[in-house]
Image (cartoon, coloured by chain):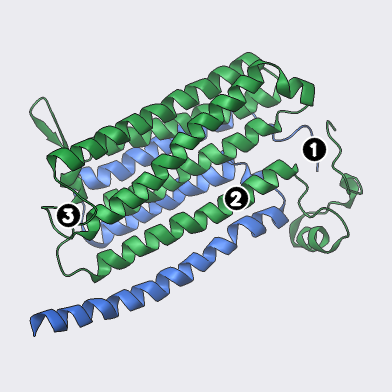
Amino acid sequence: MANELPGHGGDAALNDGLGGVVTDWSGDKQTFPVPWGKAMMWIFLLSDTFIFGSFLTSYMTVRMTTTVPWPNASEVFALTIAGNHVPLLLIAIMTFVLITSSGTMALAVNYGYRRDKKKTAMLMLATAILGATFVGMQAFEWTKLIVEEGVRPWGNPMGAPQFGSTFFMITGFHGLHVSAGVVYLLVVARRVMNGFYDRKGTYETVEVTGLYWHFVDLVWVFIFAFFYLW
Amino acid sequence: MAHSEGQQHPLSIYLWIWLLLFVLSAFSYMVDYYQLQGMLRWSLILLFMFLKAGFIIAIFMHMAWERLSLIFAILVPPLCLLVLVALMSVEADYTFLTRLKLFSD
């Protein structure tokens, strides 16, 4: 066992299943047998879930209450490539970029626990580059929507004015999370490279960073389904 | 429960889930590309969405290997959001009908 967690009566005291839930919460000990950084990241992500959940719920509410037709996302986000009109193409590419970045992050966590410094840092760097690509594509999407389609938070030529406000609010907040994640990834990748986690004796921070990054991907799954496909 | 350092699993499981997420995303894009409509569209969108979300949480975020006390603490509270959604959809229906009536007068 690489790091003994404080307050644990050894692994023998950890029974599984529902009985384990009772033991974990009732015993006079640390409830969650994970590093505190990981538990805190999960709790932060839980609060973030409520933020995005509330955003999406308010989007549902304004979309259900408007008497003006909702703009067709499939048309609004279509791209014309070499004369062909492809619906939702940019969004599909953005989705694949984000999923790819989630994959490289998962591998980075794995190599981190194998103490492969170089591969971990490179995979995290790749994740950060893919994340930055996603933000760049989002900037392109916003520009196209504002300049060419004339979408504003208070109105647009295609239909319900609430389309703009919810779109900028939800994707903007998500883009902010991706941007923050890129910075976070670069900071941790640098620390991986200079041996910080070797000295600390654990690569758990890489996994905690991964949790945040996968969450950003997870939120996109819901935005993609509810905002772009619905 | 054997604890080695943190969460160590074979690489292959990540690669498989990665591939699966790609395929599921392609499927959900196809739903729009072929302009499926009605109940089929909504049910397929929701199905692919929940499958993707489930795989990301369970495998990429390692929730499948965590202890039940952590799983409950993180995954049960968001169910409150379903209550919010239910309340707001009832309210939205009412607002919509009121608007229809007012705007037609």
Mark 2 / mark 3, whichever is N-terminal: 2
Residue drawn at the location 36% of the way across and 64% of the way down: A58
In the depicted structure, whether residue B59 falls above or below residue A188? below
Question: Which residue does the numbered mark 3 point to in the structure image?
Answer: A71
Residue drawn at the location 33% of the way across and 38% of the way down: B26
Question: Which residue does the numbered mark 1 point to in the structure image?
Answer: B3
Image coordinates for residue B70, horizontal then vertical, percent? 69, 53
Q: Quadrant of residue A174?
A: top left
The chain letter under disc 3 is A
Q: Can residue A120 be seen in this view?
A: no
Q: Which amino acid does label 2 sit on?
A: Phe
In the depicted structure, whether residue B102 falls above or below residue A166? below
Relative to A174, A28 lies left or right: right
Q: Which SS class for mark 3?
A: loop
Tell which chain the image draws in blue: B
Tell which chain the image draws in green: A
In the depicted structure, whether residue A177 falls above or below residue B73? above
Compare residues A154 and A193 and report the one nearer the observer.
Answer: A154
| Quadrant placement of the N terminus of chain A | top right
Image coordinates for residue B43, horizontal then vertical, percent? 33, 58
Please tell me the numbered disc located at residue A44: 2
Q: How far apart are marks 2 and 1 (CA)?
A: 25 Å
Residue drawn at the location 30% of the way across and 34% of the way down: A139
Residue drawn at the location 89% of the way across and 49% of the way down: A7
Q: Which amino acid does label 1 sit on?
A: His
Residue count near mark 3 (Cα–Cα under 10 Å), binned few <14, some 14–19, many ≥20 = some
Closer to the camera: disc 2 or disc 3? 2
Q: Which amino acid does label 3 sit on?
A: Pro
